[in-house]
Image: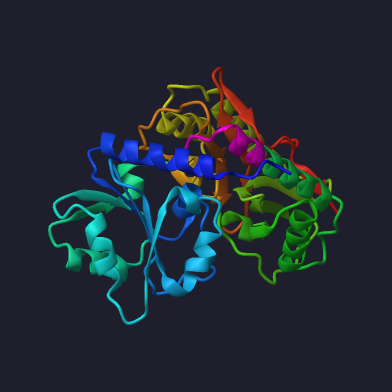
Amino acid sequence: MPRPFTTEDYRARIARAAADAAAAGLAGLVVAPGPDLVYLCGYQPTAITERLTALVLGAGREPALIVPKLERPDAERAAGAPAVRLLDWTDGEDPYATAVPLLDPAGRYGISDNTWAMHLLGLQGALPGTGFTSLTASLPMLRAVKDTDELERLAAAGGAADAAYRGILEVSFAGRRETDVAADLGALLIQYGHSQVDFTVVGSGPNGANPHHEAGDRVIRPGDTVVLDFGGLKDGYGSDTTRTVHVGADVPDEVRKVHDVVRTAQQTAFEAVRPGVTCQEIDRIARRVITEAGYDEYFIHRTGHGIGITTHEPPYLVEGEEQPLVPGMCFSIEPGIYLPGRFGVRIEDIVTVTANGGRRFNNTPHDLGIVS
């Protein structure tokens, strides 16, 4: 088991976030329930409801966590609770009045993207001179660079997903529904230590041409190409990997060709990972391989996304994202080709940036898997 995060870990994160906000020209941050709140103080309300919960940070101000009074006991049990001042409010009171003394009436704050609109509007009503901007836009690197303990968790999650993939290769595909194989994948993720399954995409035959196909009732047939994309959370950190398999050893030439192109694109992009290279350049490198092979119109999504407390988070490997890679960043590299009505191919690994290049957290073969 990994070392639990301590109050001191959360205190350091809070201090760094407040300093980063000041450096970005912000008066501070307002953080609602969600991954940013978990990252900064280890608190996740049992149920996210209409009641205001918010962590307020500002340079030179004591960090404060506003919670409904009935949820205060839960908040007090969070590992990061001693690092903040807890302020509660009771049903029937104006929760935004609790926030007013904590915010600069003329300041500009980064606010977490998953804040309910009713709370943002409530804060704006109480403090009409205060401005708010998306936390992702203003501090995109807040959670992007992982420390040693986080990297250890992500590596373990990747290893567990790899074990699930090796297990699914032993399962029968032909004659079973996509949902049956998806259930097997979910069970394998749990078996190998995941506490939460986020997705188990099983796209067989023409369904594989939809990158986000949900497993359905289609019966998988001999000769199908099947995209397997699956992941979840282990010890609080995410896994996400994709491999493509074929039902039966008689693989059509075009399936092999497309798979080889995607494999080359994925490998070429991985080899380009190093500090200083921009996120969009990794996307361009993968896309160039697929374009030169004549399949550019069939690569219809970004090359990758960040991963950490959630399986999808900033930064994104996509055209227009000029953020340079720095050691400790973690993200997927997942080019794909999708031929409508026929089949799809995607290969995905989670990668972290090191001082000298990249390190994979997924290490199963990139070969086209053969299943029965």
Is 146 within the magenta? yes
Picture coordinates of residue 360 (x, y %)? Answer: 65, 32
- Decide if residue 215 is on the left or right side of residue 113: right
Residue 301: in sight, yes or no?
no
**Which quadrant holds the N terminus?**
top right
Q: Is residue 168 above or below residue 362?
A: below
Picture coordinates of residue 370 (x, y %)? Answer: 81, 46
Quarter of the figure with residue 316: top left
- Decide if residue 34 is on the left or right side of residue 185: left
- Decide if residue 285 is on the left or right side of residue 245: left
Quarter of the figure with residue 223: bottom right
- Decide if residue 137 is on the left or right side of residue 149: left
Is 172 within the magenta? no
Q: Residue at x 30, y 68 (%)?
A: 119
- Magenta segment, principal secondary structure? helix
Q: Nearer the viewer, residue 9 or 220?
A: 9
Q: Nearer the viewer, residue 326 or 68?
A: 68
Please, which colouring scheme is shown?
A: rainbow
Q: Is residue 174 above or below residue 24?
A: below
Which segment did they paint magenta? 144-154
Q: Residue at x 65, y 41 (%)?
A: 153
Q: Is residue 108 above or below residue 257?
A: below
Q: Residue at x 17, y 62 (%)?
A: 127
